[in-house]
Every structure is written in structure tokens, then in C-alpha cells.
Image (cartoon, helix red, strand yellow):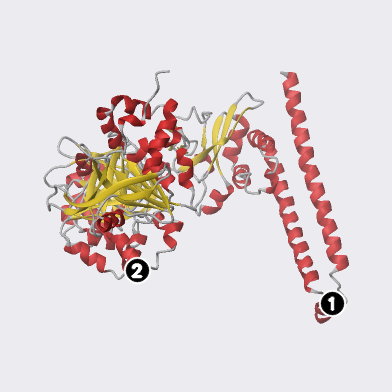
Amino acid sequence: MCIRSSTGDWGVFVQTLIISWFIALIQFTSASLLDKLQNNYLVSDLDAEQIAARESEELQRERKELQDKLKSQEKKVNYFERCKRMKEIPLFEKYLSEKMIKDKEFWDAQEAIPIIFHELIRTDAVANSTLQLRSCTLFVPTNAAVRKYNGTILVSYHMATVPMTVRQLTKTIPSDFEGNPLLYITRNRKGEVYVNNAWINQTESTEIVTQENKRQVMHIINDVLVPLTLLPTARTQVTNPNATYRSQVTLMRKESLYQSPGGHTFFIPVDEGFKQTTRSSLVDRKVIDGHVILNSVLFSAAQSTEDTHTTAAFEDNIKVTVNFYYDNDKKCDSKHSTGVVLAQVLKANIPVSNGVVHLIHRPLMIVDTTVKQFLEDNKNGALRRFYEVIMEIGGEVLDDINSLGDVTILAPSNEAWNASNIENIIGNRERMRDIVNMHIIKGRVDVEKIKQSNENMIGQFPTIHSSTFLYFNVNGDDTNEVVTVEGGGVNATIIVPDIAQTNGFVHIIDRVLGVPYTTVLGKLETDPMLSDTYRMGQFSSFNDQLNNTQRRFTYFVPRDRAWQKTQYDYPSVYKKLFMKDFAYHSRCIMERHLLIADDIYTMKTLAEMTKKQNDSIILPTFRDSLKIKVEEEVENLHDDDSTSWTGYVILWNYKRIRVFRPDVECTNGIIHVIDYPMLEKKDIVVSGG
């Protein structure tokens, strides 16, 4: 024990010596700079005009650099002096010594050490006493967090009298502030840990045992903690600017819901959300219940879009769950529509004694706007860029949407429009009009309908852009469901599904469709329908060439279900195709499907070449040549409108192979997704010897 104590004292001495040496060095350097500045350039007996005449631009620049260096060095001296005072509190002293070991250059990063909050503790008698005499857990905001916060920082609310590492943190922890208001701990799916709305930097935590044998733990956080005691209850929040909603709460006799003790989350719509004259009358008891999550205090920063939470409106006839971006009605009754309502959070994390309040721009669960009105309402929100693009090409698209009756929009998020490949075409009105139309489906298509269409085939729906289809795929189970959509060579994921409107649905997606952004190889890697062809090409390194942007490829790619069909026709061949021992044979088959030429071949071009030749056409493939015919045929989609379009069939070796998805554009070529591979039983023959 004595030896350990001595080692600790020696460590403090060395640390103090190092800091003092740094300060002395900086002061010496600063003095040298000042001497040089005064001796060489500050000539006091000359007037300003003489100085200006003598100094060249280079000398003026050097003078400015020296002055900047002097200010920087003085700032560092101040920073080091403030850091040195941290050793007065053992927990901060330990944190500082560990920081020196982990990060040798932390002295240059003057935001790295939370000196501002440390100084608040030094001036707080209660907090200072706790750190000197008691066990505790301390949450320390960064310098940036303290500067950003405008209110009074309550130091003792950042402390708990039970020492806890990150792993030991419980769901709620009584703080050391007057009345012991709770600290709320949230752990998300990514392994991140939050206290209230503040993220805990798990790499920066420090733990010590003081000389009084008291265990103490420090965690660095990125936000100031505010106790949930500033307002009496959530009821206070529904007075103004929420008078309309408050009146409905009173009318429906639901005030007790907002006064209930415990820790809850309340979503309260402001008066602006009741501009529609009939909207307030739709706020019934179930709608009010759908705005409250009982027994869970949810802070915005700690929430993940994948996490859903059950509201008070959860019973046999209606089931409403909420995540921090949208409200999802998993089950509905005859009065409350199925779907999602998107509400913008205007002000988050308002503390009240029985939980936390989030003000939202419109009520949840109420579907009373058309798709057009929804886009107009969100012109400054989640779909701002999509709305701007529509207006930049003339705005007629909004009228088209309104005239369609039932309609579904795949709306790219604001972030989706930041992709570099879109910059080159954003000013081309005709091209942008085609791209926008590719995001519009006539009819009501929600995720449930997509899933039903996926039971027998990939979900396929026509857009209002000429003969263009969107192809949907559903992966995962009900608890982790991912819906993807492909259009114009682009794969996108639906990140907010089923935003319900009176005449249809809006789905928010993470990419702009119709603007290729990846190579042929990239398309194979990311398209869930083409994974078998990609896997087969990986065995023999056949795929490596498909990333070459100096070449133009036309690739007939069998979709996964095409390969599955061969399992019944040639079971032994199918098995060998996906074995590494038969990679050579697989490569030969792939080479038959790949055309290499100076330009790409669209299906329409191939059909026209067949008509002109009035016979089979011969195309240059990676492996010799390919002899095929391409015919057009009318195909029908068995939907409510009996949609028909021109499809294509490839005739090869007496086989009729349907083209499932023609003309999937890539940055270095084009893909035609086919319903059966150009394969024969003799393609894989293994000698008996």
C-alpha cells in the first residue's frame, strides 16, 4: 500500500514538472518572439509613413505571422495554467494523466480537456466537497457543449452519489441535485449510451479510488444536462402556443393523462398544425392517446429510426407505435386511417416533472391532406429538395399528381439530392422531368401491397414515365424489415414508408432513381435480385473487369429466380455452378452473357437489329460471339388498370428467354435482367478419368 502511494505521488510530481516545463518553454519562446518583433520591426521613432515606406510586403507578412504566433503562445500558456489547476481534484488529475498517455498531442487540441466545467465545479462548494469526500459518478460536458448552452448550468445535476462505469449505468439514476431528479440512461442498437440527451464518450471514462477509499467515476458527454423539474407537469405545456390542442384535451376529459406521475414522453402539436379548419374536430380520445408514450422518457439524440415505441393508443382495434421520425399505425379501426403521419419536431426535449415534451408541427394519426398538399406542406421540411426540383421544372408535376386520383410518390430525402452524379443533370429540365415522373406511381401502393406482390415475384409497378417500372423487394422479418426499390438502374431503400394521405401514400427513399451512380459491378453487388450472378462471378474473378470505366458493357444477367429454375431442369449442373471447384465452367457461362463493344446495346436496339436482319444477329461477347434473336411482345400487368407495355424476348438455342428488366443503366454499361440463363447441360462436363 505504501509503495503504491509513493508511486502515485511521484506520478503527480512528474506530471507537474512536465506542465511547468511546457509553460517555461512557451514563455521563453514568446519572449524571444517579442524581442524579435520589437528589435526588428517596431521602430518607435519613425512615423507611420516612414515605416510603411521601409516595410516590404514580405516583411509585413512576417510581422503578422509573428504577432499571430505570439497570441497563440499566450493562449497556450493560459490553457496550460488552467489545466494545471485540474490536479487539485483527484478525479480530474487521473483523467488528465490518462489523457496524456492516450493522446501525446492533446496539448495542441485546446478543446480536448473539459476545463470550463472543471472551473464550474471549483466554484461550487457542494460539488467540490462531494469530489473531495464522497463516492460519485460525474458527467462532464465538453467545452463546446458548455459554450453552446445558454442557461444556468446546474453542476450537481451532473453528479450521482453512486459510482457507476458505463456498463453499470442503470436505466434511471438519482442525481445529487436538490430533490434528486432522475438522470435517464438510454442504450441504442449501435452500442451507444446516452444520459438524457447527451452522448457518453465511452473511450474517455475515468475511474479512481481516493485516499479516503471512495470510488469515483467520470464520463465525458457532449451536452449539458437539464433536470426534468423546470415545469410542473406536461399540462403546463398545452396552454400556449397549443391552445387548440389543449381545448380538445379538456373536451375529451384527457387532462389526467398529462398529469399522471412517473416518466413519460409527450408529443404536443402547436396551433399552426390546426390551420385546416376541420382538423381539430378529428382529435378524439384515441388520437390524444396516440401522442403519449407511457413510462418511457425519450430524448431525441438517443433515438434510432429503427426503434419503435408503443403509445397509449394500443388496444385490440387500434395499435399505434411511434419512432422519432414518424407515427406508424400497425392496426386501425374504421375511423383512424392505416399508414404513417410525418410530423416535424419543432422543439425537442422540453423538461417537465413527469417526463419530457416534444412540440410537433401537426397532430399525429390524422390523415386529412392530399399527396399534393403534403408536398406543399413539407416544402421547407423533410422533402424540401424534392419540392424545389418540382418547382424548378415548372411545377406542372403537382397538377399531374392531383389529376391522377390515387397516387403513390417515392420521394428522395433531402440528403439524396446531394449525390455528385446529380449535379451534371440538375439544370436539364427535360431530363429532370423524366426523373421526377419515374418516382410517381398511379394507384395506392403501401408496404403491405408490395409484400403481397412479392409472394409470387418481385413487386413490379408502372410509373407515369413512359414504359418505366419500379421493382420492389422485401427482405428481413417483421421486426427488421427492409424494402428496396429499383428504378432506372438505381437501388434505393425506403427509409420512411407509408406516409398516408387521403388519395395515396408517400414513401421517403435514400437515393434519386434514374440517375446511375455505380458501375456494372457495383450494381451486381447491391441489387438483391442479382446476388447469385454476383456470387458466381466472384469464384473465378470474372467480376473484376466489370469495374473498368474505360469500357462499355452490355450484360445479360440472370436474376436469382432464373438460376433457381435451372435447379429443376439440370439439378447436377446447378449444384456445380456454385462450387468453387467448378469456377472455370462458371466463368465460361458468364462470358457468354457479356457483350463488349464500343457502345451499349439497348433492348430496343437489339430488336431493331433483328428486324433489319430478318434473322439471328451475332454479337461480340467476351467468349467468341452470341447468336440470338430479340422480339418485342405486349405484356400485361394484372392490376386494376390492366396495364400493358412492350416487353422483350430473347431467342437462343431454341429457348425463349423473357427479359424481366431491360435497360438497367450503369456508369460503364447496361444490364438486361433475364428470366433464364443461356445455359445447357453440356456446359459443365467432368471427365470420368
For label 2, the residue is 429
| Callout 2 amino acid | Arg
For label 1, the residue is 54
The secondary element bearing badge 1 is classed as: helix
- Picture quadrant where residue 535 is located: top left
Instruction: Work out how far the residue at label 1 is from the one at label 2, CA to CA, in angstroms.
Output: 59 Å
Q: Looking at this view, is 26 or 499 the one in front?
A: 499
Where does the image place residue 561, in percent across and percent down from the top left?
Answer: 28, 36
- Left or right? Give the position of 291 relative to 418: left
Where does the image place residue 285, in percent across and percent down from the top left?
Answer: 17, 45
Q: Residue at x 21, y 62 (%)?
A: 401
Where does the image place residue 172, in percent across and percent down from the top left?
Answer: 42, 33
Mark 1 or mark 2, whichever is nearer to me: 2
Q: Residue at x 12, y 50 (%)?
A: 640
Assess disc 2: are there few (<14), some (14-19) or many (≥20) residues with their C-alpha within 10 Å of its C-alpha.
some
The secondary element bearing badge 2 is classed as: helix
- Quadrant where the image shows the N terminus: top right
